[in-house]
Amino acid sequence: MVSTLPSPRVSRRRLFQSGAVLAGAALGSRIPGAMALEGPQPGSPPCGLDALGRDLHGRLIRPGEPGFLVAAWPNNGRWADVTPLAIAMCVDDHDVRKCIDWARQETKPFAVRCGGHNYAGFSTTPGLLIDVKPMATIDFRTDGLVTIGAGASNQDMADAFRATGLAVPSGRCPTVGISGLTLGGGWGFSATRNGLTCDALRATDAVTADGKLHRGIAATGDDQLLFWAARGGGGGNFAVHTSFTYEPHPVYDVTVFNIVWPARHQIELMLDLQDIQLNHPHLISTRSKLVPTTGGKVTRDRLGVQTLGQFFGPPAQLRALLDRPLSRSKPIVAEINGMNYWSARDYLVTDDPIGLYDIRSSYVAGHLRGDAIDTMMAWMEKWPGGSLLQQNMGILFAAGGKVKDIKPTDTAYVHRDSDFILEMEASWSPLDTPDTVRRQLAWLTEYFAAMQAYVRPQSYVNFPSRDLPNWLKAYYGENVDKLCAVKRQYDPDNVFKFPQSIPLTPPA
């Protein structure tokens, strides 16, 4: 067995930078909205923390100590005022078990973080923050599988896999953690060709609410129900996963593209791009959106169309495929380049979203119709204004192809019959007044509600929102009852609890 560690450059950066949520939990309390949360201040009673610090192989960081504020900062700065009681930097399974045992004994809230990319702030807590980022080893096994520590990020994986000729489907944001990505399903630009991240999962290790370490959880064996839930059931519901074993796929040359059209023929272009994706679902993966071309007030004559993505073939074949939208309107940007898989990954990489923001998402089966696109543009024109140019007011991520080869009930990821994820955001900066933020959030809520006539009543759990109506059904659909059964088996005392955690029983 060969053990590959993340490069020192990436390891140092990730120890103090936000990534994806592994799991979030609270004992005996529900976390309210971020602005209302009051975390403990320096000088608070230790509550047994001295004993926990002695028990850890890693480090327990308390408020006021070096590195605390940086380690506590989440990706979404909206939740940055949630101050943990302490941060446990876990280096192994032992540390995770000690943290869970401590939280139960002390009846303190806790959250588990692989990096902090939970958009709704569920990887923040006023209690104990269990950080698994140091657990980021990547082991290439002699049986062809690869075991990855719970703290590894997309960037860690790219660094380790780059010279191997192999890859695991993953996302495009370098600081997103593999744990949260997998547990929520795992969308990325290779999903239509190779499936979701969770589809490559073959086994996982996890610490359950009783402090027990379950090794080699797989599709067969005593813990097969927990394995089913680990593929799309969301982080923080049943256990703290400490490692994941995947079956990688070979890499290949691809074509990447970034094409931007001016503010003309928007509906026709968006329909063209959907046609191409739907007619060639395994050959192409698109992220298409309407985007303001200038700052200031959003109007239709300032809304361009952009598509970005990956084509699993040569550039000439892609150009032929794109003939209709390229002929309909001359683009102002037309980057179409063949390159190897990892160069393509670097081209497509992004840290978006980051800062202060809120998100909503829905799923689309087949086309998002022309009247729906018209409605989107009408709501974009209603954006109330702010200091930032809104780049992500309406995005269609391709979510079909290979993803649809698995039945909705075969894994906890239930959205297998969909073709696109529709995502919309509002973002702001410290320059914006509380009233501006309030109006942006109200606009996003009303915009999302207006689009429900055109989409499925489903949402991606890795794009969570605290304000999502009927969130349990939206995230998990027909799999809710089975997920509640998993909860009763592995967390009967509801230790892993937060505002959108799986309940012990389905609502009436």
Image (cartoon, rainbow, N blue to C red):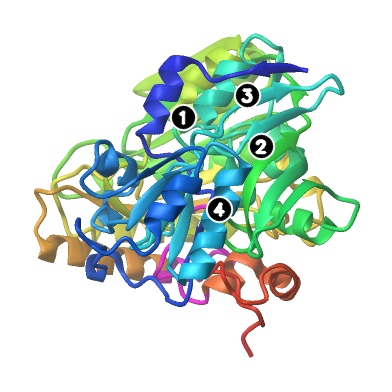
Magenta residue span: 449-470
Of callouts 3 and 4, the N-terminal one:
4
Of callouts 2 and 4, the N-terminal one:
4
Q: Secondary structure at mark 3?
A: strand
Using the image, tell me which numbered label, if any, was put on residue 98: 4
Q: CA distance from mark 2 to mark 3?
A: 12 Å
Instruction: Please tell me how crowded label 3 is: few (under 14), some (14-19), or many (20+) other residues with Cα within 10 Å.
Output: many
Residue 236 % position (x, y): 56, 59
Q: Which residue is mark 1?
A: 174
Using the image, tell me which numbered label, if any, was put on residue 191: 2
Q: CA distance from mark 1 to mark 3?
A: 21 Å
Of callouts 1 and 4, the N-terminal one:
4
Looking at the image, residue 105 lies above or below residue 116: below
Q: Which residue is mark 3?
A: 311
Residues at discs 3 and 4 in contact (Cβ within 8 Å): no
User: Which amino acid type is marked by label 1?
Assistant: Pro
Tag nearer the camera, 1 or 4? 4
**Residue in view at x 47 percent, y 37 percent:** 58
User: Which amino acid type is marked by label 2?
Assistant: Ala
* Residue 469 among magenta residues: yes
**Residue in view at x 41 percent, y 71 percent:** 449
Tag nearer the camera, 2 or 3? 2
Residue in front for this viewpoint, 262 or 68: 68
Give the quadrant of residue 190: top right
Examine the residues drawn in magenta and state their main secondary structure.
Answer: loop
